[in-house]
Amino acid sequence: MPPPLITHLYTADPSAHVFDGRLYIYPSHDRDSGIPFNDNGDQYDMADYHVFSLATLSSYHPSSSSASTLPPVTDHGPILSTRSVPWASKQLWAPDCARNPSTGSYHLFFPARDASGVFRIGVAVGPSPSGPFVADPSPLAGSFSIDPAAFVDADTGAAYLYFGGLWGGQLQCFQGPPSFERRFDASQREPSGPDVPALSPQVGVLAASMREFAAPPTDLVILAPETGAPIPADDHARRFFEAAWMHKRGGTYYFSYSTGDTHYLVYATAKSPLGPFTYAGRILEPVLGWTTHHSIVEFEGRWWLFYHDCELSGGVNHLRCVKVAELFYDDEGRILPVKNE
Ligand code: FUB
């Protein structure tokens, strides 16, 4: 197993990006506040974010038998807390960050529960990758659920926000057509049954300000390659659960995600950032701990998978640690499964 990258704090859900030649990691900051475990994820009671960075991974060769050194990681300290977000009540879950190509500002996207306990997605803006970040007074209009992943298409300059998470992440509570006013219905459950399609992750095109959606978010459809139809709801080994991530390699868009209760990291590909996507395979088998969440980034000419497990806490589900493994593709652009051993 690769060693934890950060050991002085519990960290999870790492979103990695390269800004000006340096690699930045935006993770959740896990802590134990004594809340008992439940299926709603109340024990994931995070109250702030730190940002981390490293200068190089050139001497890190996790898949080779030769000497390999984990680089020093800089902790830039706290960058946002629940107290500094006017609309948030608790649970700062998995964040992400993107540079706005029109303004050069950095936008930290983050989910949190609002005063009524509903997850929304907020944005905080700052002048550098490490902040300081100031949160907008309200969440993004039309946002709901969790796990925002921001993607700026380097070839077009267009910016997208992918998001969603089932059960504790409340995606199932927002079923309905695209609208800035999606209704929250706590009684809704994840669908199941023969021929019932899985709920889709959501994608919203961001306006140039990157502080609002240009149009209401819509379904990001993931098709099963063998039928050409959406992945069925009962196919828990392949249906979207949470942990959206988008990267582009060559002309292909790769949407990767966690299957939740089956604990896989998997991916689907498309020729458009809005899909439809076709399921393409597994990236990572289950790790130690219930959740699995990741990001994929190219750095110094190599591809990297940032992810987490619970090794640092000896297996406590909500006390996780960020890790990094090298990612390889075959000649057809398929991702080769990562060995977490
Ligand atoms: O960290 C809290 C939640 O756990 C994230 O939002 C999910 O993706 C899962 O990793």
Image (cartoon, helix red, strand yellow):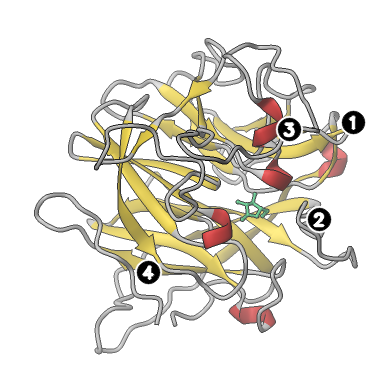
Query: Which one is in front in this view, the residue at disc 2 or the one at disc 1?
Result: 1
Secondary structure category for the residue under label 1: loop
The answer as to whether callout 2 falls within 8 Å of ligand 1 is: no
Give residue 240's position: percent from left, percent from top: 49, 44
Q: What residue sits right under mark 1 in the picture?
A: 116
Using a 10 Å C-alpha cutoff, classify the residue at mark 1 as few (fewer than 14 neighbours), some (14 to 19) or many (20 or more): few
Sequence-earlier tag: 3 or 1:
1
Q: In this rendering, does residue 21 appear at all? A: no
Using a 10 Å C-alpha cutoff, classify the residue at mark 4 as few (fewer than 14 neighbours), some (14 to 19) or many (20 or more): many
Label 4 with label 1: CB-CB less than 8 Å: no
Sequence-earlier tag: 2 or 4:
2
Give residue 19's position: percent from left, percent from top: 42, 44
Sequence-earlier tag: 4 or 1:
1
Give residue 55's position: percent from left, percent from top: 41, 61
Image height of 36 relative to 105, above or below = below
- Tell me what residue is drawn at x 79 percent, y 47 percent: 91
Query: Which one is in front in this view, the residue at disc 2 or the one at disc 3?
Result: 3
Query: Which one is in front in this view, the residue at disc 4 or the one at disc 3?
Result: 3
**Alpha carbon separation for disc pair 2 and 1:** 16 Å
Which residue is nearer to you in this view: 36 or 167?
167
- Tell me what residue is drawn at x 89 percent, y 63 percent: 35
Q: What residue sits right under mark 2 in the picture?
A: 45
Using a 10 Å C-alpha cutoff, classify the residue at mark 2 as few (fewer than 14 neighbours), some (14 to 19) or many (20 or more): some
Sequence-earlier tag: 2 or 1:
2
Q: What residue sits right under mark 3 in the picture?
A: 188
Q: Residue furthest left?
A: 331
